[in-house]
Amino acid sequence: MTSGLLVATLRNHIRRLPLLNPSPRSTIVNCGSLITPIRRKATSLARLRTVSAENPHCNQNVRRCLSAKSGKKTVKVQFIDRDGDSFIVDAQIGDNLMKVAHQHDIDLEGACEGTLSCCTCHLVVHPDWYDNLGSEPCEDELDMLDMAYGLTDTSRLGCQVIVKDNFEGLVVRIPPYEPQYT
Amino acid sequence: MFSGRYVCSRCPRFSRLLSTFKVAVVGSGPAGFYTTQELLKSQSHKFSVDIFEKSAVPFGLVRFGVAPDHPEVKNCISTFEEIASRPNVRFLGNVAVGYDVTVEELLRKYHVVVLAYGAGSDNKLGIPGEEAAGCYTSSEFVGWFNGVPQHSSLNPDLSGENVAIVGHGNVALDCARIIAAPLPHLEKTDIAEHAVECLRKRGVRSVNLYGRRGVMQFQGTIKEVREFTKLSGVRLSVESDNIEQIKSVLSSIPRPKKRLTDLLLKHSSPPPPSSSDISVCIKFGWTPLEIKTDDTGHVRSIVLRKNQISGDMMSPDITPTEETVEVPCSCVITSIGYKVLKLPGVPFCDLTHSIPEDLSRVLERPGGARVPGLYTSGWARRGSDGVLATTITDSANTAHSILEDLEKGVRSVEEGGDVSDVLVERGVGVVTFEKWQEIDSLEKEKGREKGKPREKLVCYSDVLEKR
C-alpha cells in the first residue's frame, strides 16, 4: 500500500469511527488532527495546550469548550482533578459546583443528583476560601461528608456550594479515589 | 491532507485506535455499571460492553436493596440508563452466567470479563432455631418489601409486639425502619404493595437491634440513625454499657466516628415508660444463642448472651459473660452481612468465601497466577461492605487495572459469533434493555394510579415471552 493510499484509507476509516462517549456531556474537540481526536470529557488542559501548539485553531476551541453557555454572569473557578490537572472554567452565579463541573465535563460524579444522599461530589476547598463560601455545611451535608474518603477540614459537597459573585478565583480540588491495596 | 501526527500501522497506539475491545460485565448493579462507565471514559481504548444480569431486570441492589423511602439514592439509575442506551453497550437480562453461558466461554469471546455480581448469599448465625417459621434473613425480608419475585410470598409475621433484628449495619436499620415507620411515610414510595398490606396489619410495638460489639464498632451510618429521630411515631433509644468511658475518648477520635457516637449516646437515656410510639432500641454487647419456637414451630423468643466490652473502646476486648436473657418475640430478622456466591468456572476460596484477586485481577488461587482477562469489582471483590461511593471508587480502580493490562498486551479472542446467538440456541429468553424499558414504563404507569413512583412487578411473564 502506498503512503498516499494508506493516508486516504486512514482518513476515511477515522471519519466513520463512532463517538466513544456519545453522551450529552461529551463532545469531540476537533483540533484539526484526524488521527488523534480529543475527547473533551476528562481531557486535561495540559493536553489541549499541547495540541494547540500543533494547530493554532485549537485555542479558540479550548475557549469555546470551557466557556459557560451564554447569558448569565459568571466567575472563574478552578477545579483541580484527580490527576492534578487544572481546569479554569466560567461558573454561572447561582449554579452549584457539582453542576458547574458537569457542565464543563470535569470528572466529578454526582450519583444522587444533588439530594444529599451520597458523597460522590466531594470537593476539597482551598483553605483560603473555605470561610468565604457564604454558607456552612448543614447537619445533613456533614452526615454525608462523614462517609467520604479523604475528608478534610475544608471538605464540602459540590452540590451544596452555590456559586456567588465573590467566587472569582475560587480553587477546589477533587480528592483522589481510595487506593486499592494488594 | 490532514495536520497532526502520522502514525505507523504497526504502532500499538494505532492498533488500539482501530480496535474495539470486547468486555463482558457480569452483573448490572452499581459495580457493573460504574466499571462500564469508567472504561468508556478511556481516551486511549475503545470498548464495546455486554452487561449480563441473571435477573430479568437491571440495576441490582439499587432496585432490590436500597430502601423504598430512600428514592434519592436511586437517582444513579439515570446514569445507568444513559450508559445502557449507548450504541456500544448492550444489556442482556435473564442470563445466568456460569449456567446459561460459562465464564470460560465468555473469556473465549471477550477480551475482558468483569465479575461484578455482588454478594448474594446471607451470612448465617449457625444457631438452633434459625430456620424456624418467623425467622428471616435480611435478603428475604428486604427482597420482600422491595419486590424481589422469589420473596414476594414471604408473608412475614409482624402480628406480634416484638421484633428482634440481629445486626447493626444499614440493612438492619432499614429493616427496623420499614417495620416501624408510619404507613404514610411508606405508602407513596415504590415499596411492594404486598408489603404495605402486611404492614397495615402489624402489631409491632418494639423493634430491638442486637449487636455483638460496642458503640464504637457500630456499622450503620449516621444518616440512617438520624432518620429514626425524625420519624413520627417512632422512638429511638440506645442501650450500652461503658457510656462514660466512651464519652471520655470522644474528643480524640476522627470527626465521622465522633459525630456518629455522639448521636448514639444522645439517645442512651431510657425512654419514657409508656408511649404510643413504636420503640426502636439499638442494644450493644449481645450475642444470640438460640431461637426458641412454640408448638407450631414458630418463633416465640430469642436467647441472647451478654458480652463484656472492655479495654480500648475503639478496639475493645469482647468477652462472653454468663448472663443470658430470653426475649419474647414473634419475628427474628438476621442481618449480619452477605457472602459472595461461588460461580461455576470462577476461582474461589472457600475459607474466606471470596474470589482470589490482586488489584481486581482474578487469580487461580490466593497468591497464585493470574487468570488472564478476568477481573472482579464491587461487592463480588470486596465483600458486602460500602456504599455507592465505595463502589464507584472500586470501579475506577478495576478499570485502571484493566487499562494497565491492555497497554501491555491484548488476549486473542474468537472473531465472529455473537454470544446472544448462543443463548438463543440454548433457549435462554434474553431480556434486552428495550424490553426492560417496557417493564419500566408499565411499573411507572401502575405506580401513577396509586401515587407511587412505580409499582414493581413481581412477575414479568406478562411482559416477557416465557422462557
Image (cartoon, grey):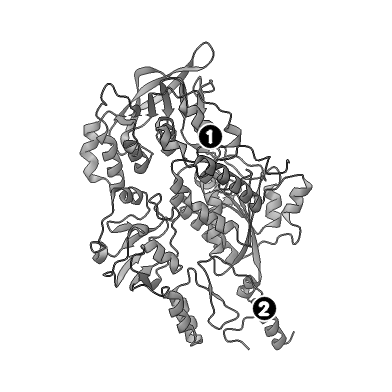
The alpha-carbon separation of the residues under discs 2 and 1 comes to 60 Å
Which quarter of the figure has residue B322? top left
From the top left corner, tell me how far across and down residue B399 is, in percent: 53, 59
Name the secondary structure under disc 1: helix
From the top left corner, tell me how far across and down residue B160 is, in percent: 44, 20
Which of the two labelled residues, at mark 2 and mark 1, occupies the earlier sequence position? 2
Residue B359 visible in the picture: no
Local packing at callout 1 (Cα closer than 10 Å; few below 14, some 14-19, many 20+) is: some
Q: Which mark is residue B41?
A: none
Kindly identify which chain the residue marked by label 1 belongs to.
B
Q: Going by the image, does B315 lie left or right of B164?
A: left
Q: Which residue is mark 1?
A: B193
Report the quarter where the N terminus of chain A lies. bottom right
Instruction: Name the mark nearer the viewer: 2 or 1.
Output: 1
Counting every numbered tag in the picture gives 2
Please tell me which residue is depicted at 38% across the width and 60% down the height of the picture: A175
Instruction: Work out whether residue A21 or residue B168 is closer to the camera in this orientation and state it.
Output: A21
Q: Which residue is mark 2?
A: B9
Q: Amino acid at mark 2?
A: Ser
From the top left corner, tell me how far across and down residue A178 is, in percent: 42, 55
Kindly identify which chain the residue marked by label 2 belongs to.
B
Q: Residue furthest right?
A: B425
Please tell me which residue is depicted at 57% across the width and 32% down the height of the picture: B151
Does residue B81 sit above or below B453 in this rendering? below
